[in-house]
Amino acid sequence: MHGFANPARFLRLARWLTPLLLVPGLILALGALAWGFFVVPPDRLMGDTVRILFIHVPSAWLGMAGWSTIAISSIVELVWRHPLSGIAARAAAVPGAVFTAICLATGSIWARPTWGTWWVWDGRLTSFLVLLFLYFGYIALAGAAQRDAAAGGGASRVTAIFGLVGAINIPIINRSVVWWNSLHQPPSITMGKSAIDGTFLWPLLIGAVGFSLVFGGVVLMRMRTLLADIQAEARLRRKAMA
Amino acid sequence: MHEGLNQWQYVYAALAIGVVGTLLLVGWSLAAMLRAEKRRDKVKGR
């Protein structure tokens, strides 16, 4: 892992890995969406609205995966002081927030025809909304810490601690439909088991893989952006001091 | 399920939000990366 602590080595890897994740990811994600939206039959109970599953579930998965990336990177940053871990955490925040927002919006659209309401304050929906606010807080805090570091205040560990503390919400989201009565259905896919028929499961899984690859590609692009900004600022500071 | 409801309106709205949101995220990230790397190379005098 520490082999990639060197930004130059990481950048060499990221340059060829970025299109390798993005292109197949977009093809798989858009192909699975087309399959799910226009090929699979309507569900017996939910009718055609079941097709929202193919965008709602991958975005929910990536909303939680984004914060899990932040939490794991924060541990690595706090314990091993890996120089790229803080950058990886910051890079995962915006895509995580975007997919969380997509999940909330598509879930609300799905709720209207199936539950008869756009929103209910139950455990699953509320904890997911809290996740979106945590992302907003993290992005604001990371931006402030970066400005502080640029002004000579030193790197802040507050962002990493916030990322770690916020991870408490992930198991709450996951178990919310089991712990509390909810309009939201219980988990359909658990370890090794699925209550979803294969007709719906395959495009869902392919879509989840595709969106995950896109997410990885976006995180790499954002890491490259943050690294390039840091390198440019460092060079400008050296020039100013010379 | 409400009878007489046009379900496809909801399906298209969700699809549009998902696809447009994802493509905007990819496009914005790509543009920001190219801009930042170009600026770094310019500062380095390449």
Image (tube, coloured by chain):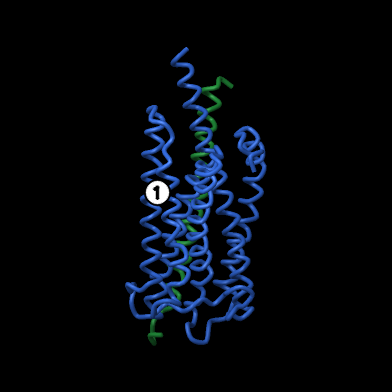
Mark yes or no: residue B24 visible.
no
Seen in the picture, residue A208 relative to A93 is either above or below; the reply is: below
Residue nearest the observer in this picture, A196 or A113: A196
How many numbered marks, from 0 up?
A: 1
Residue A111 in percent (x, y) is at 39, 75
At x 41%, y 36%, the residue is A146
Quadrant holding the C terminus of chain B: top right
Image side of residue A48 versus residue A193, left or right = left
Residue nearest the observer in this picture, A30 or A170: A170
Residue nearest the observer in this picture, B6 or A56: A56
The residue pinned by badge 1 equals A138
Q: Chain of mark 1?
A: A
Q: Amino acid at mark 1?
A: Tyr
* SS assignment at label 1: helix
At x 44%, y 76%, the residue is A177
- What's the colour of chain A in the image? blue
Q: Quadrant of residue A118?
A: bottom left
Image side of residue A140 versus residue A175, left or right = left
Mark yes or no: residue A211 visible.
yes
- Chain letter, colour green in render: B
Crowd class of label 1 (few under 14; some 14 to 19; many from 20; radius 10 Å): many
Q: Quadrant of residue A198?
A: bottom right
Residue A206 in percent (x, y) is at 63, 66
Seen in the picture, residue A125 relative to A218 is either above or below; the reply is: below
